Amino acid sequence: MLIEHLIDLGEDEAMASLSIGDLDSFYRAARAKFDADEAFAERSRARVVALQAGDPETRRLWSVLVNESVAYFAEVYAKLDITLAPGDVVGESYYNSMLDDVVADLEKAGLLVESGGALCVFPPGFTNRDGDPLPLIVQKRDEGYGYAATDLAAVRDRVSTLHGDELLYVVGAPQAQHLEMVYAVARLAGWLPEHIRCEHVAFGNVLGPDRKMFKTRSGETVKLVALLDEATERAYSALRERQSNLDDAERHHLATQIARAAIKYADLSTERQRDYIFDLDRMIAFEGDTGPYLQYAHARIRSIFRRLNAPWDPDSARFALANETERSLALGLVAFPEAFELAFAALQPHRLCVYLFDLAQRFTSFYEACPVLSSEGAQRDERLGLCELTSRTLSLGLSLLGIEAPEQM
């Protein structure tokens, strides 16, 4: 569809509109044309077959589109401080050369069934609303391949070539049945042994204040880069209003860290299968269950150590935990390994977020009840030790969520 639209426009004209900002508009124009023009739709379907067959000109045009998308992804990753690079991208077309072998192996295994001119597998246990067996279409009647074929090829390659023993698919919840059928067929074919974990890490939708899919006022999809830029601007403005000894460059850097934390934490702190409402005002706030609040909690602790009037040895701390809030904070600290293990095993990062927010609140209660710098002797060492351990735990927990813990805010 996109390649055919590129051809219709002419490559020079199309490339003028294929900036990162307009790539979405280019796709929507191609989609509208596909839905309205049957001839264009047929040409687009034929173009997919040509691409999967390795036609040189089709592959060249396809690479134009892919490179533009990868460039946009790289910009998003850089703004989010994510280490994925263009070299890590393995797109659907990577598996084109393997698709014929997928069909051949399924046929040898006696799993393929012709249905309506298409080649399908009917994995046991999957039925439609009428109770009829549900097919996974491997090769369409025009001899092209859909997502099922490339997904099966990917499973086989990841197990046999990459030797993966844990395959996690971070894909929207509506694809649950498709992926379950792919896993079932891969296991029937012997490509996915039982000892290998293959799991759909489903996630919900991002909604606007009206509880509909999050879009701009004009109805367009909101771009993550634009959201990050806006969050950074808001964080910078908020920091300018605060009294601090940060220079402008440091303030810009800190605003970037806060913006990343706001958006990442908002996404990760919600149980991933659930939809959530995107509210940038709430996300960027320094109060409440937000990324900036946890960053501020960490920075607040570090400020205690900047105010020390003499060197302090962490090994000097001994923990009597005579105060109730001291005990509560200590119990929160020793719960970190279990909280992490539960979040990791269940692939539920929101559980770690819940733990970190609770820890920050425990520290606040402790700090309000137990003077630190004004205490003396062993009690001062003990309370400084609790501060140090809380600081380390918050920093480690945030880093596991891909969030930086600034020393000063």
Image (spheres, rainbow, N blue to C red):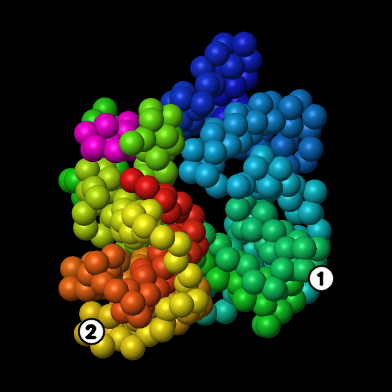
The residue that mark 1 highlights is: 108
Q: Which residues are magenta?
A: 228-244
**N-term mark: 2 or 1:** 1
- In the picture shown, does residue 393 fall above or below 217? below
- Packing grade of label 1 (10 A; few <14, some 14-19, many >=20) is few
Q: Say which residue appears at 46% left-offset and 77% top-offset.
A: 316
Q: Is residue 178 above or below residue 68?
A: below
Residue 323: mark in rendering: 2
Task: Tell me which residue sits at (42%, 43%) in the image.
Answer: 257
Q: Is residue 158 magenta?
A: no
177 vs 226, left or right, is right
Residue 401 drawn at (x, y percent): 46, 59
Q: For residue 269, which quarter of the picture? A: bottom left
83 horizontally vs 79: left or right: right
Q: Picture coordinates of residue 209 (x, y %)?
A: 19, 46
Residue 78 % position (x, y): 54, 38
Q: Is residue 295 visible?
A: no
Q: CA distance from mark 2 to mark 1?
A: 71 Å
State the residue lying farthest toward the top: 12
Secondary structure that dominates the magenta span? helix
In which quadrant of the rendered image does the N terminus lie? top right
Which residue is more in the foreground, 123 or 289? 289
- Mark 2 residue type: Asn
* Callout in the foreground (2, 1): 2
